[in-house]
Amino acid sequence: MPTSSLFPRSCTFTAMALAAAAIAGCQSSTPGTPPAAPAAPAAPAAPASPAAKTAAVKGSFGTLPDGTAVDLYTLTNAQGTELRAMNYGGIILSLKVKDKAGTPGDIVLGFNDAASYVKDSPYFGAIVGRYGNRIGGATFALDGKTYTLAKNDGANTLHGGNKGFDKKLWTGTTFEKPGAAGVTLTLTSPDGDEGYPGNLQMTVTYTLTDANELVIDYLAKTDKATPVNVTQHSYFNLAGEGSGTINDHVMQIHASRYTPVVKGLIPTGQLASVEGTPFDFRTPTPIGARIESKDPQMVLGGGYDHNWVIDQKSPGTLGPVLRVVEPTSGRTMEMTSTEPGVQFYTGNFLDGHHIGKSGKPYVRRGAFCVETQHFPDSPNQKSFPSTIVRPGKDYASQTVFKFGVEK
Ligand code: GLA
């Protein structure tokens, strides 16, 4: 069984900043001097779309029910992709990317106003933490001390507790640099926050590059040992939000193993082979092909709601996680990450009662989430890679979503 030594948890802020800069830096090769134009008479140039510009703009997204003003950040790139996010929960509100015909469509679920997110949202678009996914029994022991967390998912704790990072007001600063635009969100999670030890200084950066990548950098520093496992909970439907189920999306996950669960979706501790199971996405397969399988693990999840163990060539560095294609629109999404796991959740708990941005109900399996992470319940699972961050040993994680089209 792999041990934590095979999955280095932390790298330095400097290394991650360099990685982010390298990604943004890829853009410098794009513009250059164009080759000589062909002799054929050129069609009149289409007017440049106002969105086809690399920019980060801060605005207002109204108020929370208690009157707190909410900031809106709009990031655009040279390909006409537009991402909107707010400082409440660091929530990604919309993500408009072009389909194979060049028509933009919003590929994430969400609402049109901040109050709806406060009222009733299953983590649409949010940053989740301090510990994304579940910790069994809502308790863990660390350095001889037992910590008690909120039981907000049956007997377990889920996504940071009652008031996780998804429900906090972050502080955002927009930035623009060559070939990229972004927003840096910061938060102090105080010692004892939702039962977790240590003052945690958290930074999450969304960078939209002209190569059509959304780069997410997570950095944290603590003054006491604490588990940290932060991720992004966007719900994707590459055919467009509200356009039915994701069953026809074709998914490939670069993972030979997954972590089976018991009732309540807490891992057994085993790393099981995907071979011969509905969890084998090593070759591209429609999400819906085996989703109704009677495999006991599929029954426990009500569909896919499990952690895949990524086949990492170089743990702790950016490597391939998955690729998904939506055949009708041709939209593709590729993910790379430094994380050893990904929670692939097929919106099994959606039931149509959420009415989304374009007035359509979000039906069961109307979206999927791909949450890069360390494995669920790691603080209680000795054989899993460690999620413990300590003073002087900072947390750094990076995930990149790359959007494209396939004809
Ligand atoms: C994660 C969990 C799911 C569910 C969703 C939110 O993906 O694994 O079980 O809690 O978040 O509804």
Image (cartoon, rainbow, N blue to C red):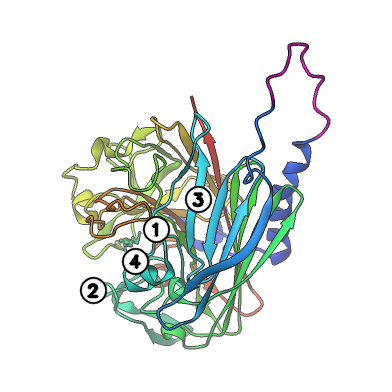
Q: Which residue is mark 3?
A: 95
Q: Look at discs 2 and 1 and give the one toward the viewer.
A: 1
Measure how far apart labels 4 and 2 are at the Cα level. Answer: 18 Å
What span is in magenta? 32-44
Measure how far apart labels 1 and 3 are at the Cα level. Answer: 10 Å
Tell me the kind of residue under disc 3.
Leu
* Secondary structure, magenta segment, majority class: loop
Q: Look at discs 4 and 2 and give the one toward the viewer.
A: 4
Residue 95 appears in the figure: yes
Tell me the kind of residue under disc 2.
Gly
Crowd class of label 3 (few under 14; some 14 to 19; many from 20; radius 10 Å): many
Tell me the kind of residue under disc 4.
Ser
* Towards the viewer: 293 or 311: 293
Pointer 1 residue Cβ closer than 8 Å to ligand 1: no
Pointer 2 residue Cβ closer than 8 Å to ligand 1: no
Q: Which residue is mark 2?
A: 154
- Which label's residue is closer to the chain start, 2 or 1? 1
For ligand 1, give the image quadrant.
bottom left
Q: Which residue is mark 1?
A: 110
- Which label's residue is closer to the chain start, 4 or 3? 3
Element at label 2? loop
Measure how far apart labels 4 and 3 are at the Cα level. Answer: 18 Å
Q: Which mark is residue 121?
A: 4
Q: Is residue 247 above or below residue 227?
A: above
